[in-house]
Image: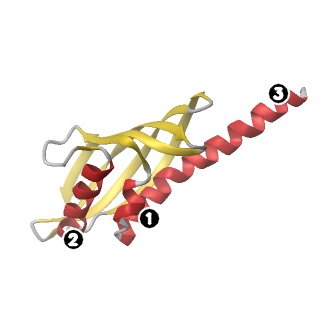
Amino acid sequence: MSAQNTEAAVQAVIDREAIRNLPLRYCHCVWQKDLDGYANLFTEDGSFGTNDPSLPKAQGRGALRSMISGQLDASKPRPFIHNHVIELQGPDKAKGTCYVEVRLLRDGKKHLMSGWYNDEYAKVGGEWKFKSRQITVDSFAPVNE
């Protein structure tokens, strides 16, 4: 392997690891109610969307911060990320899918939601961020205690 190929391979590993860390930090910010940390995981014009009309949508860091702040106390979401697949599309662009389970409250009762995120990532100022995050809800049901 040439030095140039080795350098590119090492950079790909570094990029994948940085991207893999984004959903983990996302969950951490939700659990810790870190609104600024949450919003800063996204690009300035980053967006969050969903296929579930009962879930909020937002675009831009201010709107993302407002969206999550309204959810944290009401539903107490506890997300868990699984099986992250990443596709590098260039030096500053990637996409990925990761699967999620979210334990939360709805109408005062415990619920379990599962699904997946389809993400677009952008490298901004040398740091990977969410460009867009689209959650597809596969199932949502009360948890029998």
Residue at coordinates 82% horizontally, 27% vertically from top-left? 5
N-terminal-most mark, 3 or 1: 3
**What's the residue at 81%, 34% (across, down)?**
7
Q: Look at mark 1 in the image and give the residue it sits on.
A: 28
> Which residue is tagged 2?
73
Residue visible at 35% across and 55% down? Answer: 101
How far apart are labels 1 and 2 at the CA level?
A: 15 Å
Q: What residue type is labelled 2?
A: Asp
Residue at mark 3: 5
Q: Around disc 1, counting alpha carbons within 10 Å, would you say few (fewer than 14), some (14 to 19), or many (20 or more)?
A: some
Q: Which labelled disc corresponds to residue 58?
A: none
> In this rendering, would 36 be left or right of 50?
right
The image quarter containing residue 113 is: bottom left
Q: Where is residue 4 in the image (x, y as percent from the top left)?
A: 84, 28
Above or below residue 109? Residue 135 is above
- Residue 32 visible in the current orientation: yes
Q: Give how far apart the Cα atoms at labels 3 and 1 are.
A: 35 Å
List x then y, in percent, for residue 99.
41, 46
Q: Is mark 3 on a helix, strand or loop?
A: helix
Q: Quadrant of the C terminus?
A: bottom left
The residue closer to the viewer here, 145 or 129, is 129
Between 9 and 37, the one nearer to me in the picture = 37
Disc 1 to disc 2: CB gap under 8 Å: no
Q: Which amino acid does label 3 sit on?
A: Asn
Amino acid type of the residue tagged 1 in the rendering: His
Q: Is mark 2 on a helix, strand or loop?
A: helix
SS category of the residue bearing label 1: helix
Question: Mark 1 or 2 closer to N-term?
Answer: 1
**Circle 3 residues within 10 Å: few <14, some 14–19, many ≥20:** few
